[in-house]
Amino acid sequence: MTKIITIITLFICSLISAQNVKLTVSISGLKNNTGTVKVGLYNSDGTFLKTTYKSLGSEIKNNKVVVTFDNLPAGEYAISTYHDENNNGKLDKNMMGIPSEDYAASNNAKGFMGPPSYKDAKFDIAKDSKIEIIL
């Protein structure tokens, strides 16, 4: 009886883990290797550019960065990223509120007179995936 319960438990666990996916994000077009790149993952329009679902930072090598988000539920997401050249942990802006550090979003979405929209940056993942963003 213990063996049957163990087998059923392992089967259920494998089904649950099969629903999680891995997302690899490659960011290129960085001007230099100074500082770090911050990558924010968002899972809804209401939180986009406000509260990250998950976030990662990475050192820059050869003007590129690759980060991987593990164990994500399959679904809809969007990414914003920026080059934190001075390592102060925030996207610096000038006196007019315009970012003075390079930034980008998934689908290479661009905003008009403001930041990109979630609608333009969103994408779906159902299996392990890789996306590329040019800063």
Image (cartoon, rainbow, N blue to C red):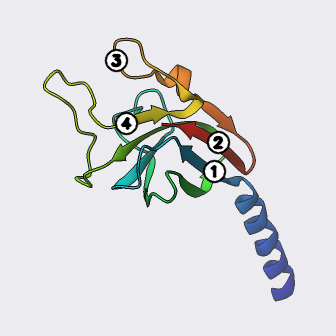
**Quick one: label 4 or label 2, which is nearer the N terminus?**
4
Q: Answer with mark 2 or mark 1, whichever residue precedes in sequence.
A: 1
Distance (Cα) linking label 4 and label 1: 22 Å
Which is closer to the viewer, label 1 or label 3? 3
Which is more toward the observer, 11 or 96?
A: 96
Which of 102 and 16 lies nearest the eye of the viewer? 102
Q: Are marks 4 and 2 in contact (CB under 8 Å)?
A: no
- Of label 1 and label 3, which has the lower sequence position? 1
Pointer 4 with pointer 1, Cβ within 8 A: no
Residue identifier under label 3: 114
Give the mark, 4 or 1, whose residue is nearer the N terminus: 1
Which residue is label 1 attached to? 23
Foreground label between 4 and 1: 4
Q: Residue at x 58, y 57 (%)?
A: 68
Marks 3 and 4, the one that precedes in the sequence: 4
Query: Which residue position is annotated with label 4?
Result: 102
The answer to whether one can see residue 35 in this image is: yes
